[in-house]
Amino acid sequence: MLRKVGNAGASREQAQALLAAYVAGLERSPREAYQRYSEHLSDFNCAFAASVHNSTSAEQRRHAAEKLAGWEGDLRAIAKSGAAPGGQAEP
């Protein structure tokens, strides 16, 4: 998609419109069967998350939140450093 936008010589506004349309297509498929599947999957995932939440103690949820916050910090530091996959910094 990015190559298509770059090779077309699109203006900034045109590129933004193309990318917005692409992302919208990712969020909601034009295929009805896939829309139903996606909605079913979302419902399942919400119910699963609620089930996990309801089956854990406040202490377990606090510990999980701390762990996730640590991972978030790690990922933000990696993104800020510009490190590429495999541990190599990008030029």
Image (spheres, rainbow, N blue to C red):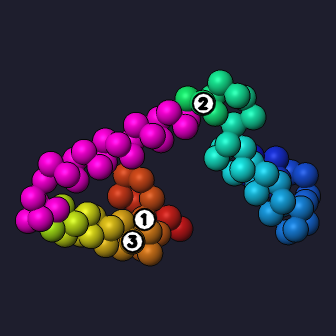
Give yes or no for residue 51 being in the magenta stretch: yes
Residue 18 picture location, percent across and down = 82, 54
Give the number of the disc on residue 70. none
Q: Magenta stretch: dominant SS?
A: helix
Residue drawn at 67 percent across, 42 percent down: 28
From the image, tell me which residue sits under label 3.
76
Assign a secondary structure to mark 2: helix
Residue 84 located left or right of residue 36: left
Measure the C-alpha gap from mark 1 to mark 2. Answer: 38 Å
Figure quadrant of residue 74: bottom left
Give the number of the disc on residue 36. 2
Amino acid under label 3? Arg
Residue drawn at 53 percent across, 68 percent down: 91
Figure quadrant of residue 88: bottom left
Residue 17 picture location, percent across and down = 84, 60
Amino acid under label 2? Arg
From the image, tell me which residue sits under label 1.
83
Amino acid under label 1? Ala
